[in-house]
Image: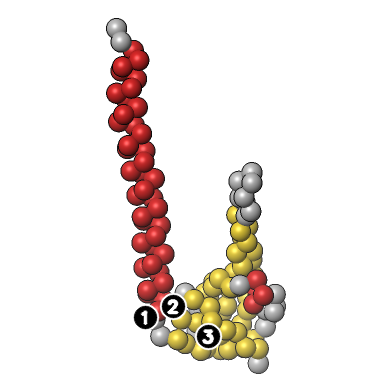
Amino acid sequence: MDFGFQMFNIMGIIVPVFMLVILGVFAATFIKGVSGWNKNNKAPRLTVPATVVGKRISVSRGGEHHHGSTYYYVTFQVESGDRMELQLQGNQYGLIVEGDHGKLTFQGTRFLNFERT
């Protein structure tokens, strides 16, 4: 029995399938990102009265030699009572406090500005 040859045949199938799965995941992630970017670009820019009702930070940890990433989110409540959570940059996040009232400008799911009134 030639066990080494059988193992080579199995690896000859598993490795390409694994590579295709990884390539598929990267392609799907890329397509989702471009789709979201395009959808936001086509959405109208809106400025509405809003109140800051929540803030949160999400930290993704990097590997042993990689840096993690920090994501900043603020939840706004508009006059209709609807809430939306938008991602901001850290410098924008630091200027906003829960309970702030003002004018929120956004485009789709993209935060553009918040001006306190």
Describe residue 95's horizontal placement relative to residue 51 as left or right: right
Can you say whether 38 is above or below 19 in the image?
below
Q: Quadrant of the C terminus?
A: bottom right
Mark number for residue 42? Answer: 1
Disc 3 crowd rating (10 Å Cα; few below 14, some 14-19, many 20+) is: some
Q: Quadrant of residue 94?
A: bottom right
Q: Is residue 109 visible?
A: yes
Mark number for residue 56? Answer: none
Q: Residue at x 38, y 50 (%)?
A: 25
Tell me which numbered mark, 1 or 3, is placed earlier along the sequence.
1
> How far is the residue under mark 1 from the one under mark 3?
15 Å
Mark number for residue 108? Answer: 2
Say which amino acid is labelled 3: Thr
Q: Quadrant of residue 6?
A: top left
Tell me which numbered mark, 1 or 2, is placed earlier along the sequence.
1
Label 2 sits on a secondary structure element that is: loop
Say which amino acid is labelled 2: Gly
Can you say whether 112 is above or below 71 in the image?
below
> How far is the residue under mark 2 from the one under mark 3?
10 Å
Can you say whether 103 is above or below 66 in the image?
below
Q: Are marks 2 and 3 in contact (CB under 8 Å)?
A: no
**For the residues carrying marks 1 and 3, which lies nearer the camera in this image?**
1
In the image shown, does 15 or 104 lie closer to the viewer?
Answer: 15
Q: Is residue 79 visible?
A: no
Describe residue 20's horizontal placement relative to residue 104 as left or right: left
Q: Which residue is mark 3?
A: 105
**For the residues carrying marks 1 and 2, which lies nearer the camera in this image?**
1
